[in-house]
């Protein structure tokens, strides 16, 4: 929980504590928390600051028509409920109990978000040096769209700082209700810095409109998504050296997230970007996923999602490993859609019976071995990103 300093360009910035997560309600009383937790659905939850123990937090969870209040103890720069499991921040703690009740009355399922864009807590980002004045961004006469996402469109802009202009990508909020989710993504991104993760440059809070608009400004990746890169260039231009480089770069970024206990949840070639000098970087790694995403609702990327994540909503670094294996298949098939010839409605049934895709033409056997191990139905039997990286990095040296 100690602030860490980093430099983006020549600007000093520190981590933003994750009190901007949508489920964090700050200084509210026990009674107010209980009134917010309605209807009393099992697993409905929020986090507040402890009123009885300043500096600690309280996790409030609905179970059997009651609200249970768990003290979250801040001890030795770590957070714990049972003094058995310790976490670096609230985000990690909440994600752990979303995956497993682990001693709580029930697993955390649905959060009660803070409401109202005008109540956005921007002060934490301002104090940490992450806020960019909107006047420092130049979108040009016509906004150029780089991509469209679930929460907002991404545009090309020029970021002016100290007389220097540089290209940046700017994700602009699509719907007002997603503002807190944007802040959740950005707050995670302020804690991370790695050569294979797309770097956050800063945020813009545009308060001139009726509602506060939120922009997330990241480094510009000129060659677009890895998926588009593979498909547009194909076998004619994407070499074996390129393939192993993209695989190793992506794995390196994911190994870093794994070391920080951060789960991606939507790893795929479309969420990896390629820089001007052909470095692959993972994007959307801090994105908070909406609780409403469901298998029936069709929002899940079924072909990339592990069985336990699809059926039980159990996301983990090991479910990310499953997705990474599908991404490897995309790289070595030059961007083909996974599970060819199998209808989408049949994919889950095939996978649950142990079906694994065949190796793409020309795929090295060592790469296919990684895929097969990563598609083990038992998450615990899948390799870690750290162990996969060792194999890929060694292969890269000899291609």
Image (tube, helix red, strand yellow):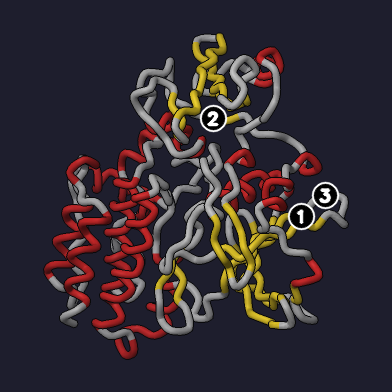
Residue with the most extreme left position: 365
| Residue 115 at x, y percent in the picture | 73, 35
| Residue 133 at x, y percent in the picture | 78, 64
Within-10-Å neighbours for mark 3: few <14, some 14–19, many 20+: few
N-terminal of the two: label 2 or label 3?
Answer: 2
Q: Say which of 275 and 328 sits in front.
A: 275
Q: Distance between the residues labelled 2 and 1?
A: 25 Å
Q: Is residue 138 left or right of residue 12?
A: right
N-terminal of the two: label 2 or label 1?
Answer: 2
Residue at 49%, 24% in the rendered image:
73
| Residue 24 at x, y percent in the picture | 62, 33
Q: Name the residue under label 1.
A: 213
Q: In this view, does 189 lie to the left or right of 257?
A: right
Q: In this view, does 160 lie above or below 123?
A: below
Q: Name the residue under label 2.
A: 110
Residue at 30%, 76% in the rendered image:
245
**Rendered image quadrant of residue 197:** bottom left
| Residue 76 at x, y percent in the picture | 44, 32
Residue at 40%, 36% in the rendered image:
313
Q: Name the residue under label 3.
A: 211
Q: Say which of 162 and 295 sits in front.
A: 162
Q: Check contact, mark 2 vs mark 3: CB within 8 A.
A: no
Quarter placement of the C terminus: bottom left
Q: Check contact, mark 3 vs mark 1: CB within 8 A.
A: yes
Judging from the image, what secondary structure is the residue with disc 3 in? Answer: loop
Within-10-Å neighbours for mark 2: few <14, some 14–19, many 20+: some
Q: Say which of 212 and 189 sits in front.
A: 189
């Amino acid at each position: 929980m100690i602030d860490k300093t980093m430099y983006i360009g020549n600007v000093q910035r520190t981590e933003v504590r994750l009190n901007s997560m949508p489920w964090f309600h700050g200084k509210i009383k026990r009674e107010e928390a209980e009134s917010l937790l309605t209807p009393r659905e099992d697993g409905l939850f929020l986090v507040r600051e402890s009123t009885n123990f300043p500096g600690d937090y309280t996790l409030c969870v609905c179970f059997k028509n009651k609200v249970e209040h768990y003290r979250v103890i801040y001890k030795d720069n770590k957070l714990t409920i049972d003094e058995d499991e310790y976490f670096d921040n609230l985000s990690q703690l909440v994600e752990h109990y979303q995956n497993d009740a682990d001693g709580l009355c029930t697993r955390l399922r649905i959060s009660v978000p803070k409401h109202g864009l005008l109540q956005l807590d921007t002060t934490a980002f301002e104090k940490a040096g992450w806020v960019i004045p909107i006047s420092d961004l130049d979108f040009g006469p016509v906004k150029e769209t780089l991509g469209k996402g679930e929460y907002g469109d991404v545009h090309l802009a020029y970021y002016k700082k100290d007389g220097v202009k540089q290209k940046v990508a700017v994700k602009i909020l699509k719907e007002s209700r997603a503002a807190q989710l944007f802040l959740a993504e950005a707050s995670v991104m302020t804690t991370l810095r790695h050569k294979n993760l797309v770097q956050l440059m800063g945020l813009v809070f545009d308060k001139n409109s009726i509602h506060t608009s939120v922009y997330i400004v990241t480094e510009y990746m000129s060659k677009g998504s890895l998926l588009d890169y593979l498909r547009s260039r194909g076998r004619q231009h994407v070499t074996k050296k390129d393939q192993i480089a993209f695989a190793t770069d992506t794995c390196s970024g994911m190994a870093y997230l794994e070391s920080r206990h951060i789960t991606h949840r939507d790893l795929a070639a479309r969420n990896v970007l390629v820089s001007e000098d052909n470095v692959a970087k993972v994007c959307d790694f801090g994105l908070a996923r909406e609780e409403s995403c469901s298998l029936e609702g069709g929002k899940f990327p079924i072909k990339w999602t592990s069985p336990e994540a699809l059926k039980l909503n159990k996301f983990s670094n090991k479910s990310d490993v499953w997705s990474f294996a599908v991404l490897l298949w995309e790289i070595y098939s030059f961007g083909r859609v996974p599970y060819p010839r199998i209808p989408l409605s049949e994919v889950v049934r095939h996978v649950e019976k142990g079906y694994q895709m065949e190796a793409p033409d020309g795929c090295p056997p060592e790469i296919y071995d990684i895929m097969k191990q990563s598609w083990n139905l038992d998450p615990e039997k899948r390799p870690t990103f750290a162990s996969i990286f060792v194999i890929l990095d060694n292969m890269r040296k000899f291609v």
